Amino acid sequence: MKGFQQLLHFGWHQALSCLFPVVIFAALALTQVLSLPLIPRYDWLLLICIGMQWAMLRSGLETRDELKVISLFHVIGLALELFKVHMGSWSYPEEGYSKVFGVPLYSGFMYASVASYLCQAWRRLDVKLIKWPSSWLVIPLAASIYFNFFTHHFWIDVRWWLSGLVVIVFLRASVSYSVNELRYRMPLVLSFVLIGFFIWIAENIATFFSAWEYPNQREAWSLVHFGKISSWLLLVIVSFLIVASLKRAKGKEETNIHTVHTPTR
């Protein structure tokens, strides 16, 4: 029973951390079946995302520092969307006033929702990094993974080489998290795989509700290819590395401030 209670408590914190993604999925489902007045569906989705972001900040569910991280992911995701849509990897077939070069602006919030989940779960579960590798390895690896999403259209796709590097660099790293004041530990590479898998499931739900569509889904919806998990896995790694680096920098800053203001004898 103790283990079952711990699992329920862990699931509850995970559910609270997924609040932003859940609102996006709910909005995708509702706007597909309801008749929307005045403006197109994509514009309603943008307004809902902006309203949710404002509500989370106003209610204290997200801090201003977390909003800065989420905004960074919005920009990173939107840049990737603009490129991928231009290259024909996927499309947004519906009309919208808020579309820029074929990409509706609400799409950036889907990437931001991943960052929102990471920030929320990090705080709620008191995540600690164990044997985190040097920034000299982490930052170039994250940058290489992100830019491979662009360069593989013109050069060879090195995602599997990058995946191998991830395993090598983070082989000894793990995350520690707290559930009801009991701490647990998980290999970091395993956490990457699990998050990437669940985002692939979320992608299937999103395409089912016409958030976007792949070329093979234009005639009728079909399951997103299982190989897409590798793409989401790498994108999750980029997201995690950015959040982790910013959290570590923030932690060092707070430690330095505390040290300065602590009187010495």
Image (cartoon, rainbow, N blue to C red):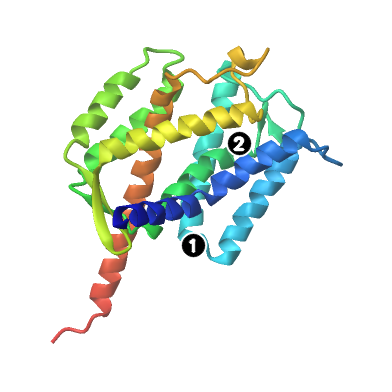
Disc 2 marks which amino acid?
A: Ser
Q: Callout 1 environment at 10 Å: few (<14), some (14 to 19), or many (20+)?
A: some
Determine whether 23 is above or below 258 in the image. Answer: above
Residue topped by disc 2: 107
Question: Residue 80 at x, y = what percent?
Answer: 52, 30
Q: Nearer the viewer, residue 224 or 94?
A: 224
Cα–Cα gap, marks 2 and 1: 22 Å
* Mark 1, residue position: 63
Quarter that holds the N terminus? bottom left
Of all residues, the one furthest to the front in this rendering is 1
Local packing at callout 2 (Cα closer than 10 Å; few below 14, some 14-19, many 20+) is many
Q: Position of residue 28 (x, y in %)?
A: 67, 37
Residue 34: give x, y in percent of width and height. Answer: 79, 38
How many circles with numbers are drawn on the protein? 2
Q: Residue furthest right?
A: 38
Q: Nearer the viewer, residue 109 or 183?
A: 183
Residue occupying the point 50% across, 61% down:
64
The image quadrant where one finds the C terminus is bottom left
